Image: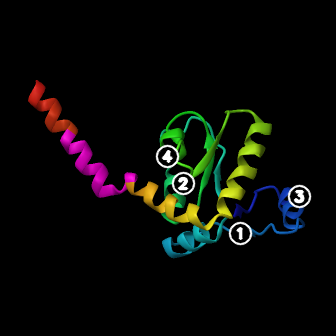
């Protein structure tokens, strides 16, 4: 899935490529989930992401992710076979990671692994872990 670029010439160039579909931004959760599930991979090429919520959402929908090897992104997709990391600022490494992410998206077993991995970021589990941490810190004080 490629969101529609703001640059009209770039949008026209991308739309002319076989297999590329440009889409307007999703306006509701159901549309977003359907798009994540349709995509072969989700790419978050930004830098210094504290977490990478877009990638966690994609994983929850069964779609592998690609992101920079910095910030919180390695925690979200690293080491579990549910995504690929690239060196920040290295365009060739990003392209290589994207190709590997597309390969992952073609493997039916990866979808189930993505969903299972995303459970680590479930809201209830995260809240419970934070409360446990605060209790532990309070017990030591």
Mark 1 element type: strand
Crowd rating for badge 2 (residues with CA inside 10 Å; few <14, some 14–19, many 20+): some
Q: Pointer 4 and pointer 2: residues touching (CB < 8 Å)? A: no
Query: How busy is the neighbourhood of tag 4: few (under 14 within 10 Å), some, or many (20 plus)?
Result: many
Residue position for label 4:
76
Q: Position of residue 25 (x, y in %)?
A: 63, 66
First in sequence: mark 1 vs mark 4: 1
Q: Depth check: give the residue in front, 40 or 30.
A: 40
> Are the two marked residues, 1 and 4, in contact with CB atoms closer than 8 angstroms?
no
Residue receiving disc 2: 54
Q: Could you say whether the residue bearing mark 4 is in a helix, strand or loop? A: helix
Q: Which residue is mark 1?
A: 23
Q: CA distance from mark 1 to mark 3?
A: 15 Å
How far is disc 4 from disc 3 in space, using C-alphas? 34 Å
- Measure the alpha-carbon separation of dots 1 and 4: 25 Å
Q: Please give the range of residues in magenta.
A: 120-132
* Picture residue at 81% right of the left edge, 55% below the top: 7
Residue beneath label 3, please?
Answer: 9
104 lies left or right of 119: right
> On the rendered structure, is 123 left or right of 30?
left
């Amino acid at each position: 899935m490629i969101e529609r670029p703001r640059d009209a010439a770039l949008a026209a160039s991308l739309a002319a490529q076989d297999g590329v579909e440009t889409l307007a931004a999703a306006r509701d959760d159901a549309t977003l989930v359907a798009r994540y599930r349709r995509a072969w991979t989700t790419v978050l090429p930004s830098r210094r992401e504290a977490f990478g919520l877009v990638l966690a959402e994609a994983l929850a929908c069964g779609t592998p992710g690609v992101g920079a090897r910095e910030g919180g992104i390695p925690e979200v997709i690293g080491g579990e076979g549910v995504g690929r990391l690239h060196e920040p600022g290295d365009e060739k490494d990003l392209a290589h990671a994207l190709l590997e992410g597309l390969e992952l998206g073609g493997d039916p077993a990866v979808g189930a692994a993505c969903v299972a991995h995303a459970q680590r970021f479930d809201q209830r589990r995260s809240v419970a872990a934070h409360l446990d941490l605060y209790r532990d810190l309070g017990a030591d004080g």
